[in-house]
Amino acid sequence: MKTVWLVDDDASIRFVLEKALSRAGFQTESFASAESVLSALEYNQPMVLISDVRMPGMDGMTLLEGICKEHPELPVIIMTAHSDLDSAVQAFQKGAFEYLAKPFDLNEAVNLVESACRANAKTKTKPAQAEQKAQDIIGEAPAMQEVFRAIGKLSASSMSVLINGESGTGKELVAGALHNHSPRKEKEFIALNMAAIPKELVESELFGHEKGAFTGADSVRKGRFEQANGGTLFLDEIGDMPLDVQTRLLRVLADGEFYRVGGHQSIKVDVRIIAATHQNLEELVSAGKFRDDLFHRLNVVRLKLPALRERTEDIEKLANYFLTKSAKELKVESKILAPDATKKLKAFHWPGNVRQLENTCRWITVMAPGQIVTEADLPSEVFVSAVKTTQSTDWLEQFQVWFDNELKQGRENIWPDIQAEIEVRLINTALNHCHGHKQDAAVKIGWGRNTLTRKLKERNLN
Ligand SMILES: Nc1ncnc2c1ncn2[C@@H]1O[C@H](COP(=O)(O)OP(=O)(O)OP(=O)(O)O)[C@@H](O)[C@H]1O
């Protein structure tokens, strides 16, 4: 997803920009000071950065100078309430991508960000970024070790890879690492989320368009395939790709050629595809929503990223990593998790996976009162949902995790034990509910009375 970082000490400006940009499909992150964004840039980079000029502490122009020195490929849009010629000229002289005078039209701001993104995609030295990210994949769980092994094994090849995993499990991170460890690492790595692009625009986003191909196509535009030539195209949420675009994609994969929308001249490219999805593609194929032949082309190598709840052994390390990272970003002392807090984090269900843990660690860094973080300092969602987890139907998923762990530890013939456990709990609960009335309890469970009597005997419950 295309990320945009916003720097402004005025929370209301940050708020309206965040809203407008996320509506346009961008992922935003906001910073209240130039200092905090400079430290964040040491670890990560957005596609575009928008900064105000006047801020307490370091001002926007000094920030711009710093960015041009350290991250020259990052387009910076400077905004200021003082729209005079001087500040505009100064912004450009210092290397700003564009200048936005407040009050500005939100559509104009979004359009500027779009074009800055395109400029970035052309010039960006993505490999360096991917390399940084590749070092940062944390995972000691066996399933993650498998992923690392696969990245290593695939390092000399350009094979298509299909990555499966829930949202926030690190699919894009792994795709970046695959690219960075491939012979294509000097070329572009372009990530595109199919679910974030309106259906009618997918085709021109991927294949580009000629001038006048449709209303609004004022100039020729290169698509992502052309931009990624020689490099890697990461297609996230591939299950959401419209069927007609699937057909075109299949053709490009087969012969490496395509036409821009409205174009008559075929264009040849050499692009490695890494696709990802949280959906079951086989099921989509059976339902006629995904092309069988495309599935087989993409499914040359498949990597499965485990949900965070399936690798609880990594939670502590990841949490400490994110706490250190966000403390550096915010220039504060890193928080330390007390054992009860760690235990709570490990017991939580993490429906948003690693991304949610990362956000929780940011929250802790800002909100926890002391340096040592106890269970009581954790955000309420971790509490509420941890309780809910043990009470709701999530128990089935917990059961699955437990079962998986038992299997990993080499356990066999597990069913008789589970059956006994389940039956004892079923019988006791039903009898309690029915005040010991066996006939009623049998009806509640769905057994005949004779079965209940036999089970009571078998399980020594009399
Ligand atoms: N193993 C990991 N080690 C360190 N950071 C991780 C790890 N996995 C994920 N992250 C971080 O979690 C966040 C989400 O990861 P990423 O965007 O790669 O997930 P995703 O599966 O592609 O999500 P989505 O499907 O929603 O796009 C990122 O900030 C990423 O850096």
Image: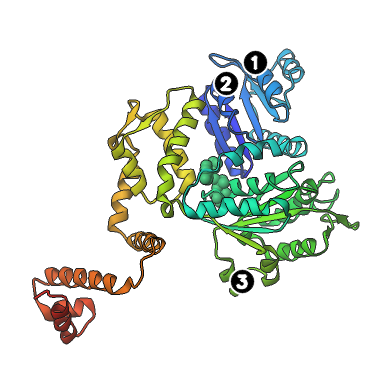
Front residue of this view, candidates 147 and 54: 147
For the residue with label 2, is its CB less than 8 Å from the closest atom of ligand 1? no
Q: In screen coordinates, is 344 left or right of 184?
A: left
The residue that mark 3 highlights is 285
C-alpha gap between disc 2 and disc 1 = 9 Å
Label whose residue precedes the other's in the sequence (2 or 1):
2
Residue 232 appears at what percent x and percent y?
Answer: 72, 49
- Location of residue 52 in the rendering, given as x and y in whole percent from the top left corner: 61, 22
Please, what is the three-letter code of the amino acid marked with disc 1? Thr
**Residue occupying image coordinates x 75% and y 61%:** 249
Q: Nearer the viewer, residue 182 or 34?
A: 182
Viewport quadrant of the N terminus: top right
Q: To which residue does mark 2 refer?
A: 34
Q: Which residue of the protein is positioned furthest toward the right in this rendering? A: 265
Residue 257 located left or right of residue 150: right
**Mark closest to the chain's N terminus, 2 or 3:** 2
The relative height of residue 342 versus residue 350 in the rendered view (above or below) is: above
Residue sitting at x 12%, y 74%: 461
Residue 435 in the image: state x and y as whole percent. Answer: 8, 71
Secondary structure of residue under mark 2 = helix
Residue at image x 8%, y 73%? 436
Amino acid type, mark 3: Val
Quadrant that contains the C terminus: bottom left
Tell me the CA gap for discs 2 and 3.
49 Å
In the foreground, 9 or 375: 375
Quadrant of res 160:
bottom right
Residue under numbered circle 1:
62
Task: For marks 3 and 1, give the CA distance.
Answer: 54 Å
